[in-house]
Image (cartoon, helix red, strand yellow):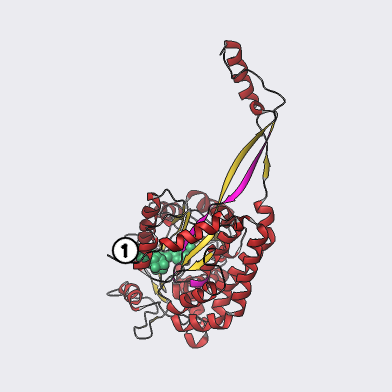
Amino acid sequence: MSDIQFTKEIQQQRDFFFSGKTRDIDFRIAQLKKLKQLIMENETKMADAIFLDFGKSEFDLYTTELSIIYTDINESIKKVKSWSKRKRIRTNVLNMPAKSFIMPEPLGVSLIIGAWNYPFQLSFSPAVAAITAGCTVILKPSELPSRTSAIMAEIVNTHFDPGFFRVIEGGVPEMTALLKEKYDKIFFTGSIPVGKIVYEAAAKFLTPVTLELGGKSPAFVTAKCNMDVTVRRLVWAKFLNAGQTCIAPDYVLIEKSIETTFLQKFIAEIERSKFAVENGNYVQIINERNFDRVSAHLSGQKIFYGGKMNREQRHISPTLLTDIAFDHPIMTDEIFGPILPIISFTNLDDAIYQVKQRPRPLALYVFSDNREEQNKILSSISFGGGSVNDAMMHIVNPNLPFGGVGDSGMGNYHGIAGFRAFSHEKSVLHKSNYFEPSIKYSPHTPSRLLWIKRLLKWS
Ligand code: NAD
């Protein structure tokens, strides 16, 4: 049994929350500005750490992590006042004369658990949402990229009041101890199995959760697509971060008639992209365990393109597998690496049917210029979020709530969705004292009941 305990740290946060400081919007704005300033001052250190952790370049760090965090902070600073305002709501006839309104209030002490693949973004962006909503934050980044976790701890723990914002580093023992405590909100990003552990721990205290999980995200490519644009965008989305992106296209569903041309162009684009750490646009697989997990998909497999591996450097080159059927073993779990299975179809309805039989994906992409095909796919399959004629870029629009559905998660964030994830919408009816109709009181006569029914109809 581990003797790690965080009871004191959580109590310190609860005391801070009850002090009421976080209810002050100016306090929240000041904390957001401070966080932004600290991240800006530490950009170089962060770039060095993430490069040493898994070969991620400064360009990728900025475009896929820092830019999203800065957008979230700027958006929050600009809009937190209006998001936090009481909102007047129409009052129903039965309650008149009265006013009705919704008062957003912070949920309280929050626990945020990050994943390793975009370690800064997946830790700081939910923290920004929590601060904006007026919560206190215990942040547990992923332990796998250890240098990035250490930098986050340094940035936060030396500059923020620990009662308000604290980073706790560690792996499973620390997580197990953290999950024994009661929070007012848990926000988890990671795998489905660990998501279930978190959900179960939260259930003991009826703590609300947001679960940002993974899964197999399909990309439909039909004969009516713009082939050159499709190929360019798909190659970028699949091999960014060496395929270690929760919303990366996991597999491609291609219309049979264009498969040969698509594959030729796809390979040409991979070669043009020169994926290599030396070129600053390819990262390592995070650790040996994941290298072995991803490379196991290729053992005994007929490889159509790529398949070069170096365990010491934790590199797997962009790899294509063709002639894949839905019942192939690679179609069971999320790949989370630079291997792209291609499934061809001749009937779009059949392909849609097959996707619908599987767990609901976190993302889905439709590459087609035909409105009917786009609408058919978008409206018949349930998925977290996605795009038409692009892949992954929906995450950089802060006005689109980001999250999964079913097995890919619950709840969403970024922009106002993040504020709502850490808030409770308190609803209030403010009644006037001037008029007190007696219809709800005794004696309960038939005419009073008739009036109640009429008033309900008019409401
Ligand atoms: P993971 O579930 O292994 O780890 C996530 C967090 O949980 C880490 O902080 C880790 O320390 C902790 N953890 C690990 N094992 C635990 C256990 N047994 N008990 C308690 N806590 C534990 O996930 P990961 O490998 O870091 O990330 C990859 C997964 O995350 C993929 O499935 C990917 O799709 C998903 N993901 C989802 C999103 C999203 O926004 N939906 C974003 C990134 C990654």
Q: Secondary structure at mark 1?
A: loop
Q: Nearer the viewer, residue 47 or 254?
A: 47
- At which x and y percent is residue 251? 42, 65
Give the number of marks.
1
Seen as rendered, the residue at the extreme right is: 434
Ligand 1: which quarter?
Answer: bottom left
Name the spot of residue 173 as percent of width and height, x first: 34, 67
* Residue designated by label 1: 328
Residue farthest bottom in this picture? 278
Q: Quadrant of the C terminus?
A: top right
Q: Is residue 303 above or below residue 185?
A: below
Residue extent of the magenta highlight: 99-120
Residue 386 in view: no
Q: Is residue 320 above or below residue 382?
A: below
Q: Quadrant of residue 62?
A: bottom right
Q: Nearer the viewer, residue 164 or 144?
A: 164
Q: Horizontal placement of 47 versus 101: left or right?
A: left
Q: Position of residue 330 (x, y in %)?
A: 34, 66
Q: Is residue 220 left or right of residue 322?
A: right
Residue at mark 1: C-beta within 8 A of ligand 1? no
Question: Is residue 195 shown to the viewer in this render?
Answer: yes
> For the point 67% across and 46% down, which residue is it?
86
Q: Callout 1: 10 Å neighbours few (<14), some, many (20+)?
A: few
Q: Is residue 357 left or right of residue 268?
A: left
Rendered-image quadrant of the N terminus: bottom left
Seen at 35% across and 57% down, the residue is 197
